[in-house]
Amino acid sequence: MNIVVCVKIAPDPEDLEIGSDGSVSTAHAEWSIGGFDLPALEAGVRLAEIHGGKVIALSAGPSSINQSKIKKDILSRGADELVLVVDETLQDASTAETARVLAAAIHKMEDVQLAFFGEGSADLYFQQTGAQVGERLGWLCLNAVQDVRLIQEGMLQVQRTLDVEMQVLDVPLPAALSVTSDICEPRLASMRAILQASRKPVIEWSLADIGIENLAASVEILAVQAPPRTSRKGVVLGGSVEEAVRSLLNNLKKEGVL
Amino acid sequence: MSGDKLDVIVVGAGVAGCTAALLLARQGLEVALIERGPSPGSKNLSGGVLYGRVLHQVIPNFWEEAPVERWITNNVVAFLTDEDSFLLDHKTQAFNQSPYNAVSVLRSKFDRWLGEQAEAAGAILVPGIKVERLLRDGERIVGIAAGEDEMFADLVIAADGANSFLAQEAGLRPQIPQEHVAVGIKAVIALPQSVIENRFRLDGNEGSAFNIVGSATQGIAGGGFLYTNKESLSIGLVIQLAHLIEHQKKASEIFDQYLGHPWVATLVKDGKVVEYGAHLVPEAGLKMMPRLFTDGMLVIGDAAGLTINNGFWVRGMDLAIGSAMAAAEAAAQAFRNKDFSAASLAFYRQKLEESFVMADLKTFSRAPHFMQNDRLYTAYPQLLSEVFRQIYQQDALPHQPLRQIAREAVRRGNLSILDLLRDIWNGGRAL
Amino acid sequence: MKRLTVTEKLAQNKYELDDGHPHIVVHNEVCEAECKIRACLFVCPAEVYSEQNGKIVADWAGCLECGTCTVACPPQALHWEYPRGGFGIIYRYG
Amino acid sequence: MSDQNQIFVISEEVSLIGELVSAARQLNNDGFSTIAAVVIGDQSDVQRVGSFAVDQIYWIEQVPEGYLVEDVFLTLWELVNQHKPTVVLIGATTSGRLICGRLAARLDVSAITDVRSFEQVKDGLAARHMIFAGGAERLERPRRLPVLFTIAKGQFEADIVQSHTAPQVIPVPFRLPEKRAILRERKDLPPISVNLAEAKRVICLGRGIAHQEDVAQVEQLAQVLGAEIACTRPLSEGLGWLPRERYIGISGAYIKSDLYLGLGVSGQVQHTIGITNARVVVAVNRDPDAPIFKQADYGIVADLYEVVPALIQGLHEA
């Protein structure tokens, strides 16, 4: 049973630069695998370690995802193979285009029965990819998955944690599962794993390779700005703790919130 | 990979480590380049001027692809008092042509590019891994360990920077004495490219390098630097540690006052600090140099203390590359003879002696001592500024002849002519 | 240019914080025994060290990993090592 | 009945439907569309939704025993296919996100999730949502119909409209899904004791809290102040001192309380995006340079272990 784990390689939100005019730039941002995708990769690798099978990491995006540092990082965390679908039009791809590309790539892989997705991407956090890819593949899709076990050939037992309930389910393969970020602790790559990573295959597909002729954008991005700063008084109350607390309580009364 | 044995393990993907891994990979050796940061350059910080002609020998015309910032055509020595400044400003078009004499670099981008060249040549880069200890077979170093992973190699090259815990663990150097190092503090200040080019009168990709002496370090031995990058300034201080401890002044406050100095403030006006970093700078030159090799191991770059600061320039990266070249030659011979003993690896020291690296270290071996001279930081900047102020001051009174101005300034600065002459003599021999 | 405090300067940097794995441990008993001048309080460019009710405390999260303290302090006063691989300061410029 | 433009409003959580209807009415200010709510539940749920000024209610009686609420997808898909709504608003619950994704895939359209606000632009309807962990806001316009949005609890105000003609209620049979996961076990999690989105007063704990036992001391203050206790992500996801639904910020709760009191909160953007709608923000932190002070109305630079007892004392006297 081969497992595919979809990961998003994107600019690191921490490297975001906000201009004085509220403009937003990721020009100097480091691209890396999303923090929510690491537990998904770990979950896939652990399952394969127990039941055998190959773990294929899959990512789609513009040429910025095709960096040796990132490929090595993914392959040193237990994936056996990395497939990259690289095309400039995937820059700022919407949920529909992302799902269409990933589904087409998985479709081209043989003997893959199970797909893992992170809770959401680190940069956009739409929390949509798992459901959209699963449905396009015609597979069973579930999100908020917190534990996965293979109980028999072709059948998983999955635990989900929703808003107000916890479920244990038998899930027939093939399935697309979006996992929560506390499903398991992602491993730190060991020196041996990083050395071996440089010997693992990286396969690059174009859109044509996965049968996609044109990928018209289904969403138009109109603007990206820093969120409006609600103006705050910024008053720092001085004096001793007692004095500061007393003047705070007076202010809150005046504001009518106490 | 035959079991866990490689030909060479290089620890530290700074300028020295990347260059050594590149040269060894070119010899067809199986090389692992291990870096504790998430990528080469993420833990490295330099003033930021690379004297490029030695790297040109390793990677011809490297500046065409390497992420260099500017070619330095303008070198300035600035003597600062608390209020005033006296500058020796040299600019030459000779440095505006390839092969470029010196280029300003930002290590995060530059070392990452250099690491990619090593990978392209076949070295295996292993980022995000901290080497914790050496592996020994009796006296011989046979590999390294990180966590429970062990990796063996015929040769280990320690390029792990100024603190060089590996050279200390291998018994090649003692705990670093305070007199042998300076603390380097640096800020990168973003400014639009056009502002930099106007403010420093730079055309195209030209760059300026300022070496600053005097009140920048509040009278403590050391100096400041300010280098122009494409869209930022690298500005910092190198403060002699023993002197700093003796004066018990706060390093971060000295740096803050330095940024606020009237002359410096005009150069960083409207800038935005985008990074604040620090790095230990080996200062003692020859005196500090540890034994460079032992059975199965070589030490290169800052780890070997290869830095020269003589007030006019601070050089580390070109010496690091020189040491990597010498180490690569010694490794080539060791692999030819299948002999990795200290005796065989002594060839590294010999190659270093024959190269500009040791030659320059010897030539400027007195520089560290000369730089300890307090007068450099208080008296002489004061003298220069005082003399020139008087030369240009016109009070509608009879103007003193220049020699009298100089003589009185020397006397008022309670300097003895003897001190002045001895300092000029020592300066001449040291620089 | 606006003067920034050290904390504000450090806030511009990128760190990968290794929560729960401090890489600096201060042995106050050695500090008391061997160190009069408390060099750590003034040599560190990141002001990692501070004195709180007589004890030296290390706010290791902002450390710039220059190692100056390892040279300035009495040898056994600090257990100082680099953070785990991939953690700590990450210079974006350098 | 010729199907004018319809706006569908879907959530398995009836309480969220009210907020979705408010959002739908905002989009429908020109009055061209009718608003249809899909209700999964019993008669009383239909009653309740009726009070939200919707024009139709598609009523799916209940999900058969052993089925998941997500198994309503096929029924929903046929409803959407039949009535061709131009806009579909879905409650951003865990099940809502899954249903939205499957619908988007089937309709080959994109979905925009956790919408903060809408804007009519020249070529149609655009929506704003947060990206880069709250670091930026993006305005996007879907190019194809129907447009699919999910809306998080607390984002729009549910308002009851009295004088409104009773909605037309159309029962819809539950269509069994082709394939499904078999529910083996189901357990209710302790009901979320707190609805931060509705709380009038919130006390938020940050990394400044040294030990888990200290939370008790703050609970005493919360009691006196009549405030709900919340936390930043490290305390819920990292240390697990407080349950996930008490976490404010990106992928957590957004509050619109009268008072927010941050104790030992540093003020990272991933957290503060959840408090922008709080009326008065107060911050207590030992570090004078903590970013939270720039985003607070009133700040006290002191140790929270001294401020909390002083606050309790001050409140008793008041």
Image (cartoon, coloured by chain):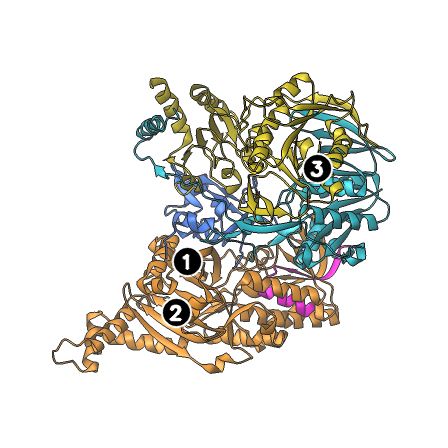
Q: Which chain is cyan?
A: A
- Residue B157 lies, with reference to residue B349, above or below; the image says above
| The quarter of the displayed image where residue B262 is located | bottom left
Q: Look at label 1 and name its amino acid.
A: Leu
Q: Secondary structure at mark 2?
A: helix
Q: Residues within 10 Å of mark 1 (few under 14, many from 20)?
A: many
Tell me what hue chain C is rendered in: blue
D61 or C83, nearer to the observer: D61
Span highlighted in magenta in the image: B2-24
x, y (%) of residue B393? Answer: 19, 75
**Numbered mark located on residue B241 in the image:** 1
- Nearer the observer, disc 2 or disc 1? 2
* Residue on which the image places disc 2: B199
Chain B's shade in the image?
orange
Is residue B7 inside the magenta stretch? yes
Identify the secondary structure beneath mark 1: helix
CA distance for labels 3 and 1? 52 Å
Instruction: Name the residue nearer the viewer: D111 or A61.
Output: D111
Parent chain of label 1: B
Q: How many dots with numbers? A: 3
